[in-house]
Image (tube, helix red, strand yellow):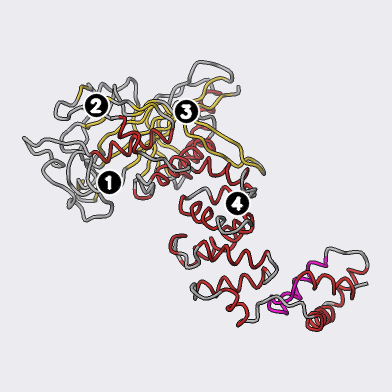
Amino acid sequence: MEFDVVIGLEVHCQLNTKSKIFASDHNSFGAEANTNIGVLTLAHPGVLPRTNREVVDSAVKLGLAFGSEINRFNYFDRKNYFYPDLPKGYQVTQDSRPVCVGGSVRFVLKEGRSYVNHEVKVHHIHMEEDAGKSVHAADGTLLDYNRAGAPLLEIVSYPSITSPEEAAGYLTEVRRIVRFLGISDGNMEEGSLRADLNVSLKPEGSETLGTKVEIKNMNSIRFLQRAAEYEIRRQAGILQAGGKVLQETRTFIPETGETEGMRVKETANDYRYFPEPDLAPVLISEEQLAAIRIPALSYDLFHTFVSEYGLPEDNAYVLAEEKELSDYFKEAVSHTPHYRPVSNWMVSYMRGDMNERGISIGEYPVRPPRLAELVNAIEEGKVSHTAGQKLMALLTETPGADLMELAESNGLVLTQDASSISGWVDEVLIRNKSKVEEFKKGKKGLLGMFVGEVMKLSGGSADPREVNKVLMEKLK
């Protein structure tokens, strides 16, 4: 029997507002336990919450980025469910009137050698408060209320994802979008972004959905994909053997790559939702909507970089991953018409250099105009690409230096001096007599190797075009 895979995700995004969603307590990660708390977080009697307007603005911004309908009038509800680490004993969330409805997330996935467009429909986005953290120690359970009341946006997709790869791509794009918008750092290892994964199988072509299994609190995109892959295999094995899949909540065990049952869900929980009586409804005006600006997002940037700038898809994908990278690229190409060489430098050289230095593109010493100046010098034949790498290393140490003065003082300006080039060519050919014989016997691809060796010998100062001419003359 063949099956269709049906996956849906509930993504919880913790916002980076300075304070919590209904209290002025500080909202930050990594503080000493129970220091970001106050009377509202601890649910003291008689205290009243107040909605953080920045949380609403962030929710609207995300909804506009998804193309959602914004509910101009929405309100909060009480979800009556016992959380041991949420002192009120209930959660303030949104049920019947969420802030954003509908929309979709568009992204690209590499399939084979090309990138393919995907789109996942979003059911809604709602605002809610987070619970605290239970720390299970050898001598008992400890409670840290720092995270209790932290602002969350829950993004609920339709069950329309058809593969683990697509699920991972969707979550990756959601993380990119919240980072592009500046509403969350999206750090999954810190819990700023986590997802509940819903997986079911149905007979191929059937319209009837199968029994759904939920895998809770996935805090890694790689783990989410592995969990989906395992769960598909597990459920397929049960169904092919004539069994029934239990509707249950499971957890993923990274060490084994398997999911493990936590609790069976025979019926839906009765949360007894009702409108939160201590909070006024949220009203969103036309002026508020008009004031929100959405930057170009990674999906659109990828296609712009490919279609308008002529970049290779791999380069475009990397540059569209982060807003800072795409902004750097766009500023650099405003100073040069050589778009592809700029992207090559950023992807092939600068990214590795940044990783070694442990810095971001915003901290990189060579700013966009200087990179454009270097690319122009290479493309205009003033310096070679080999010399350009040496110049880039020098510029990272002395970013304010004049480029051509730096090239001249380090012997990196291209020379067309026939005598010098002829001497370098002779030396390379003498060192590689066996390769010369192979070339003369028809292995013409060795010409590139000879050119590279001459460029190394000249320290990058020989004009490659002249080197080619001299080599072809001497190899006759």
Q: What element carries label 2?
A: loop
- The percent position of residue 69, horizontal first and vertical second, equals 38, 26
For marks 3 and 1, give the CA distance. 27 Å
For marks 1 and 4, give the CA distance. 33 Å
Q: Is residue 320 magenta?
A: no
> Which of labels 3 and 1 is toward the front?
1
Q: Which of marks 2 and 3 is nearer the N terminus?
A: 2
- Check disc 1 and report the residue beneath it: 17
Comparing 290 with 259, the one in front is 290
Residue 459's place in the image compared with 78, above or below, is below
- For disc 1, the neighbor class at 10 Å (few under 14, some 14 to 19, many from 20) is some
What amino acid type is highlighted by mark number 4? Asn
- Check disc 2 and report the residue beneath it: 75
Q: Is mark 3 on a helix, strand or loop?
A: strand
Asked if the residue under mark 1 is in contact with the one under mark 3, i.e. CB atoms within 8 Å, the reply is: no
Residue 64's place in the image compared with 365, above or below, is above
What amino acid type is highlighted by mark number 3? Lys
- Give the extent of the magenta segment: 446-463
What amino acid type is highlighted by mark number 2? Tyr
Q: Does the magenta stretch include residue 456?
A: yes
For marks 2 and 3, give the CA distance. 23 Å
Comparing 361 with 244, the one in front is 361
- Check disc 4 and report the residue beneath it: 315
Secondary structure mostly taken by the magenta-highlighted segment of the chain: helix
- For disc 3, the neighbor class at 10 Å (few under 14, some 14 to 19, many from 20) is some
- The percent position of residue 406, horizontal first and vertical second, equals 58, 78
Q: Which of marks 4 and 3 is nearer the N terminus?
A: 3
- For disc 2, the neighbor class at 10 Å (few under 14, some 14 to 19, many from 20) is many
Q: Which of marks 3 and 1 is nearer the N terminus?
A: 1
Asked if the residue under mark 1 is in contact with the one under mark 2, i.e. CB atoms within 8 Å, the reply is: no
> Which of labels 2 and 3 is toward the front?
2
